[in-house]
C-alpha cells in the first residue's frame, strides 16, 4: 500500500497526541534523521530517546498549512499542551515508501505572541 506523504506526516503527529509510540515507530524508517535548532541530525534511537518524552505534554495539533512537493511535506502547525499553552512550528518531513526518513524543525513562537502587534521582544542586557 502506497502511503500519501501528507497522511504519513499527520499520522506521526497524531501518534504524539495518542501517546502511541508503537504507531510512530512503524512510521519512522531505520535510517531516519532529525534536525532542529537544538539537534543536529539525530539518528532514530537518539530521536526517540530525546523527543518522544515530549508526547506526555502534547494535547493536540492544529494544522495551519500542509503542502507536498515530491517526497517532502511542509507542515506549519499550532500545538496545544496539556497545560493550555500553545506554540507554532514549521517542519519539513521527507517521506519515502510510507515512512519518515528525515524531519527538519524550524521553531516558531509562543501563542499568544509575547511581542505586541507591530513590536518586538526586547533583548536582555
Image (cartoon, rainbow, N blue to C red):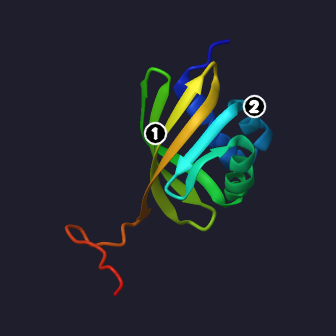
Farthest residue, direction top: 1
Q: Which numbered dot is residue 61?
A: none
**How many numbered tags mark residues here?**
2
| Left or right: 8, with 110 as reference point | right
User: Please, is residue 1 above or below residue 66 in the view?
Assistant: above
Secondary structure category for the residue under label 2: helix
Q: Which badge, 2 or 1, comes first in the chain's sequence? A: 2
Q: CA distance from mark 2 to mark 1?
A: 20 Å
Residue 120: give x, y in percent of width and height: 26, 72
Residue at 75 percent across and 45 percent down: it is 45
60 or 74, which lies in front? 74
Residue 2: horizontal and vertical position, in percent? 63, 13
Q: Residue at x 49, y 61 (%)?
A: 86
Residue 80 in the image, given as x and y percentages of width and height: 55, 57
Please name whichever residue, 78 or 30, is drawn nearer the observer in this view of the structure.
Answer: 30
Q: Quadrant of residue 14?
A: top right
Residue in front for this viewpoint, 32 or 82: 32
Q: Who's the residue at 42% across and 64% down the image?
A: 111
Q: Is residue 24 left or right of residue 8?
A: right
Q: Can you name the residue that lies furthest to the front here?
A: 40
Q: On the rendered image, what quadrant is the N terminus found in? A: top right
Badge number at residue 75: 1
- Depicted 10 relative to depicted 122: above or below: above
Quadrant (top left/top right/bottom left/bottom right) for the C terminus:
bottom left
Residue at the image position 51 percent from the left and 43 percent from the top:
104
Q: Marks 2 and 1: CB-CB under 8 Å?
A: no
Q: Which residue is mark 2?
A: 26
Q: Residues within 10 Å of mark 1 (few under 14, many from 20)?
A: many
Local secondary structure at mark 1: strand
Q: Quadrant of residue 112?
A: bottom left
Mark 2 crowdedness (10 Å alpha carbons): few <14, some 14-19, many ≥20: few
Q: Position of residue 33 (x, y in %)?
A: 62, 40
Amino acid at each position: 500500500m502506497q502511503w500519501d506523504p501528507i497522511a504519513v506526516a499527520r499520522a506521526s503527529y497524531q501518534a504524539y497526541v495518542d501517546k502511541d509510540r508503537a504507531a510512530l515507530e512503524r512510521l519512522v524508517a531505520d535510517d531516519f534523521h532529525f534536525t532542529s535548532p537544538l539537534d543536529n541530525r539525530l539518528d532514530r534511537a537518539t530521536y526517540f530517546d530525546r523527543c518522544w518524552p515530549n508526547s506526555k505534554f502534547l494535547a493536540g495539533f492544529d494544522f495551519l498549512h500542509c503542502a507536498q512537493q515530491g517526497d517532502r511535506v511542509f507542515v506549519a502547525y499550532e500545538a496545544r499542551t496539556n497545560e493550555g499553552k500553545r506554540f507554532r512550528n514549521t517542519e519539513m518531513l521527507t517521506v519515502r515508501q510510507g515512512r519518515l526518513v528525515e524531519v527538519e524543525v524550524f521553531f516558531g513562537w509562543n501563542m499568544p505572541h509575547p511581542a505586541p502587534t507591530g513590536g518586538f521582544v526586547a533583548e536582555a542586557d
